[in-house]
Image (cartoon, grey):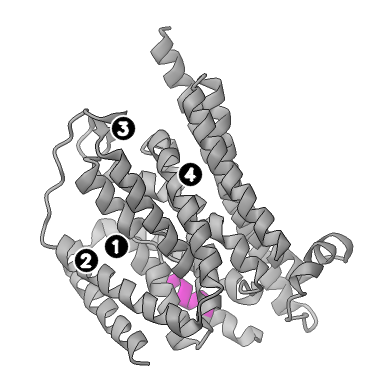
C-alpha cells in the first residue's frame, strides 16, 4: 500500500457515494465492486472499507433524520435486536469464507439489487397510510405539509427479514437497506420516508456490529479506509442534493443496468 | 401538560440530543481522518504498515502521535458513534419510563459489546 492510491480512493468514494445518495442506497453496493475490480483489493478489505463508509454515511443521515423526527426509534430498536444478531453472525462467518466465495455471493446480491431497482422503477404505489398495528408514530411530511400518522404491521415477519438483512450486511459490507426499506413499506405499511429514515438509523448500528470483527482481523487498512470513507461521505451529501433536481426513473434504469454488468464482471472474473 | 405530551417532549429532547451527539461523532472522526491523511502527505515518509492488532492499544496509548494513529482514532470513533446512538436511546427510554424498550435497547447494546469482546479476543 502506498499513498499514491489516495486520490483514486477519494475519487472512487465520491463517485460511489454520489450514486448511492442519488438512488437512496448506501454506497456499499457500488463501492465494493469498485475497490475489487478497479483497484484489485482483496474482497475482505473491500468489505471492511465499505462497512466503515456505511457507518459514516448512516451516522450523518441519522443526525438529520432525528432532528426532523422522521425516525421510528422504537421500531428501529426492535428490529435492531434481529439485525445486530444477523450482522455479528455474518461478520464472523465472512472471515471463514474465501474471497472467491464472497465475490460470488456479492455478484448474486448485485443481481437481486439490480432486479429490485428495475421492479421499483415500474412505479409501485406507496401503501395507504393507516395508523393501525404496533409502534404508532407520526412525522411531518415536508413535501405535502401533512402530519403522517402510521402504525406498523407484520412485525414478526419484519424481524425475520431484519436477521437476513443484518447477515448480508455483515457478510458483504452493505447497509442492508435494500432489504429493510421494501419490507417496511410493502409488508409493514410504513410510509417510504419514515421507512428510509428508520432504516438509515439502523444501518450504522448494524454495520458497527460487524465492524470490529473486520478490524480485529486486520482487514481495515487505515490508508485505504480513511480516504474512501471521506469520499463516500462527501459524495453521499452531493448525491442527496442532486437527487432532488434529477429525474430518478431514468437514473434508476441506468444504474440497474450498470449493476447488472458489474455482477456479471464479478461472476466471470 | 398531559402525560402524553410530557412523554413526547422528553422524546423530542432525546432525539435532538442523539442527533447532536451523532453529528459530533461524525465530525470528530472525519477531522481525525482528514488530519491523518494531510499529515501523511505532508510529513516525512509515514509508516504505512499498520501495527498488528494485538499491539494496537499500546500503539494508540503509548507512542507519540503519528498520522497512522490519527487515522486509527478516526476509524475507532466512527465505529463507536452508533454505540453512542444506542446508549442515548436507552437513556431516552429510561426518561420515558418505558421499561420494555429500555430492555430491548439494552439487549442491542449488550450484543454490540459482546461483538467488541469477541473481536478483542481474536
Determine the residue positioned at 65% across, 84% down.
A3
Determine the residue positioned at 48% across, 44% down.
A63
How far apart marks 4 and 3 lie (CA) works out to: 16 Å
Which residue was labeled with disc 3?
A: A139
How far apart marks 1 and 4 lie (CA) works out to: 20 Å
Residue stretch in magenta: A9-14
Q: Are marks 4 and 2 on the same chain?
A: yes
Near mark 1 (Cα within 10 A), the count class, few <14, some 14-19 or many ≥20, is many
Instruction: Give whichever of discs 3 and 1 has the lower sequence position.
Output: 1
Point out which mark residue A63 bears. Answer: 4
Which residue was labeled with disc 2?
A: A117
| Helix, strand or loop at mark 1 | helix
| Helix, strand or loop at mark 2 | helix
Residue A73: % across, % down: 42, 36
Residue A28 lies in the magenta-colored region? no
| Helix, strand or loop at mark 3 | strand
Amino acid at each position: 500500500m502506498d499513498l499514491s492510491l489516495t486520490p483514486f480512493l477519494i475519487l472512487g468514494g465520491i463517485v460511489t457515494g454520489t450514486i448511492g445518495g442519488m438512488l437512496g442506497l448506501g454506497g456499499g453496493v457500488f463501492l465494493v465492486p469498485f475497490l475489487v475490480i478497479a483497484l484489485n483489493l482483496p474482497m475482505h478489505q473491500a468489505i471492511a472499507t465499505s462497512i466503515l463508509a456505511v457507518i459514516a454515511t448512516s451516522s450523518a443521515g441519522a443526525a438529520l433524520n432525528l432532528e426532523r423526527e422522521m425516525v421510528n426509534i422504537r421500531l428501529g430498536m426492535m428490529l435492531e435486536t434481529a439485525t445486530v444478531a444477523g450482522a455479528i453472525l455474518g461478520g464472523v462467518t465472512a472471515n471463514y469464507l474465501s474471497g472467491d466465495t464472497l465475490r460470488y455471493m456479492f455478484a448474486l446480491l448485485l443481481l437481486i439489487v439490480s432486479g429490485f431497482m428495475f421492479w421499483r422503477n415500474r412505479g409501485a404505489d406507496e401503501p395507504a397510510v393507516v395508523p393501525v398495528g404496533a409502534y404508532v408514530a407520526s412525522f411531518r411530511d415536508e413535501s405535502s405539509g401533512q402530519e403522517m400518522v402510521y402504525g406498523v404491521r407484520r412485525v414478526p415477519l419484519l424481524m425475520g427479514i431484519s436477521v437476513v438483512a443484518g447477515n448480508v450486511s455483515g457478510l458483504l459490507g452493505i447497509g442492508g437497506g435494500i432489504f429493510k426499506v421494501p419490507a417496511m413499506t410493502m409488508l409493514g405499511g410504513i410510509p417510504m420516508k419514515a421507512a428510509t429514515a428508520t432504516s438509515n438509523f439502523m444501518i450504522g448500528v448494524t454495520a458497527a456490529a460487524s465492524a470490529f470483527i473486520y478490524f480485529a482481523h486486520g482487514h481495515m487498512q487505515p490508508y485505504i479506509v480513511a480516504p474512501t470513507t471521506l469520499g463516500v461521505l462527501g459524495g453521499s451529501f452531493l448525491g442527496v442534493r442532486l437527487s432532488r433536481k434529477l429525474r430518478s426513473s431514468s437514473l434508476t434504469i441506468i444504474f440497474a443496468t450498470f449493476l447488472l454488468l458489474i455482477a456479471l464482471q464479478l461472476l466471470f472474473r | 401538560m398531559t402525560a402524553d405530551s410530557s412523554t413526547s417532549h422528553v422524546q423530542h429532547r432525546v432525539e435532538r440530543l442523539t442527533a447532536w451527539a451523532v453529528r459530533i461523532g461524525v465530525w470528530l472522526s472525519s477531522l481525525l481522518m482528514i488530519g491523518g491523511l494531510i499529515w501523511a502527505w505532508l510529513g516525512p515518509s509515514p509508516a504505512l504498515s499498520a501495527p498488528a492488532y494485538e499491539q494496537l492499544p499500546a500503539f494508540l496509548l503509548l507512542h507519540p502521535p503519528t498520522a497512522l494513529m490519527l487515522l486509527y482514532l478516526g476509524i475507532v470513533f466512527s465505529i463507536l458513534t452508533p454505540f453512542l446512538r444506542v446508549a442515548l436511546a436507552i437513556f431516552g427510554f429510561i426518561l420515558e419510563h418505558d421499561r420494555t424498550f429500555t430492555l430491548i435497547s439494552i439487549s442491542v447494546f449488550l450484543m454490540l459489546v459482546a461483538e467488541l469482546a469477541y473481536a478483542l479476543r481474536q
